[in-house]
């Protein structure tokens, strides 16, 4: 019996250690909430935590109440960024994370004036044209057609500042 | 007897590789309740197309997001209009925008939109399919291709369009319905946009 226990226990312990040792140092977390300048909740913003030393990143989508939690994370110094269309990207640097502890951050995002989109277009025909659109999410004015370009003369591409094909 | 420790050791060694290949979290949000057949076909098509370029997908719903599941990369995709064949939207030969990805100050954000009504309008044979279930599945397949295209922008953080294949900015209905459409070999060799 003893022999059987030994034969089972050692491999099981080895397996657990093999699986969990790499995670032991990653028991810290970053939590927070995102609001706008008026204090209203900003839901569904993407929050990115980047460990400064390693450059490794983790992303989370904050919930309908603006809350988010990034865990488990290895201790270290982080920069936190929140992004969402209609808002200016928000960067918070120098967020220190000690082993086993939680860093709580409050983020306030400001409205952006204009944002554009990269469109994919289609036409019910084998022949067609690329169209340049400029869209404005923030102002809610939809997409405005700027110009048409023959696909044969403009294969591939392209975006220049403000003009997206 | 050595199998378990060996397995544990292997997992430890492979952990960084497994983490590096972690899936992209794709959060879906629907304006209106979609056809289940369309969503299933869309997921299957998008996952298949992206798997061929080495991208795995973890599907999630914005409505069920608790804000506590981290990913290496994630994207949010909103589906506007009705993602199901209705048999009433008029077909068109106009050029329609099928999908968009947000850009702010020249930077691509991981937020995309897929326009179900526009897809239905450029594909009247699917919209008016006699078998609604088959029509929804065909619609879902096309939606999966539009979704894969937008994820190309959102995940790579690029405004670049390819000259052919799914990275092309313009697709004909023949492209969208073809038996096989995929990204070109080098499309995903661009480096993902670094976090700022």
Image (tube, rainbow, N blue to C red):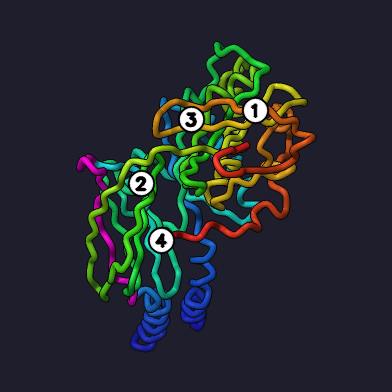
Choose mark 3 or mark 1, whichever is in front. Answer: 1
The residue under label 3 is: B36
- Quadrant for residue B126, please give it: top right
- Quadrant for residue B78, please give it: top left
Choose mark 2 or mark 4, whichever is in front. Answer: 2
Residue at the extreme right: A152
The CA distance from mark 4 to mark 3 is: 31 Å
Q: Are marks 2 and 4 in contact (CB under 8 Å)?
A: no
Which chain letter matches label 1? A
Apparent side of residue A159 relative to residue B193 in the rendered image (left or right): right
Is A126 covered by the magenta stretch? no
User: What percent of the width, then of the height, locates residue A4?
Assistant: 39, 84
The CA distance from mark 2 to mark 4 is: 14 Å
Q: Which mark is residue B107?
A: none
Residue at the extreme left: A39
User: What percent of the width, then of the height, locates residue A145?
Assistant: 58, 25
User: What percent of the width, then of the height, locates residue B91?
Assistant: 63, 14
The CA distance from mark 2 to mark 1 is: 32 Å
Residue stretch rendered in magenta on the structure:
A25-40
The residue under label 1 is: A147
The residue under label 4 is: A58
Asked if labels 4 and 3 share a chain, the reply is: no
Mark 2 or 4, nearer chain start:
2
Helix, strand or loop at mark 3: helix
Camera-side residue of B47 and B37? B47
The residue under label 2 is: A45
Choose mark 2 or mark 1, whichever is in front. Answer: 1
């Amino acid at each position: 019996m003893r022999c059987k226990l030994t034969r089972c226990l050692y491999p099981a312990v080895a397996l657990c250690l093999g699986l969990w040792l790499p995670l032991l140092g990653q028991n810290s977390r970053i939590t927070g909430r995102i609001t706008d300048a008026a204090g209203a909740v900003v839901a569904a913003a993407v929050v990115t935590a980047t460990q400064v030393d390693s450059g490794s990143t983790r992303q989370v989508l904050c919930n309908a109440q603006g809350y988010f939690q990034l865990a488990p994370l290895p201790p270290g110094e982080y920069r936190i960024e929140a992004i969402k269309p209609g808002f200016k990207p928000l960067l918070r640097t120098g967020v220190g994370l000690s082993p086993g502890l939680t860093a709580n951050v409050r983020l306030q995002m400001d409205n952006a004036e204009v944002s554009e989109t990269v469109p994919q277009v289609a036409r019910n025909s084998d022949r067609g044209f690329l169209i340049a659109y400029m869209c404005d999410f923030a102002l809610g004015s939809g997409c405005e057609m700027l110009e048409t370009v023959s696909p044969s003369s403009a294969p591939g591409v392209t975006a220049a500042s403000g003009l997206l094909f | 007897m050595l199998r378990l420790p060996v397995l544990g050791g292997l997992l430890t060694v492979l952990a960084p590789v497994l983490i590096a290949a972690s899936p992209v979290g794709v959060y879906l949000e629907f304006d209106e309740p979609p056809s289940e057949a369309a969503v299933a076909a869309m997921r299957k098509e998008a996952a298949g197309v992206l798997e061929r370029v080495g991208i795995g997908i973890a599907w999630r719903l914005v409505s069920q997001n608790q804000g506590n599941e981290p990913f290496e990369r994630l994207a949010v995709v909103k589906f506007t209009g009705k993602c199901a064949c209705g048999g009433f939207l008029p077909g068109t030969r106009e050029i329609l925008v099928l999908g968009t990805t947000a850009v702010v100050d020249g930077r691509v954000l991981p937020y995309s939109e897929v326009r179900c009504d526009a897809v239905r309008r450029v594909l009247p044979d699917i919209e008016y399919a006699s078998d609604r279930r088959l029509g929804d599945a065909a619609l879902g397949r096309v939606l999966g291709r539009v979704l894969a295209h937008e994820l190309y922008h959102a995940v790579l953080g690029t405004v670049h369009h390819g000259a052919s294949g799914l990275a092309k900015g313009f697709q004909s209905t023949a492209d969208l319905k073809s038996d096989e459409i995929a990204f070109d070999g080098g499309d995903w060799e661009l480096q993902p946009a670094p976090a700022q």
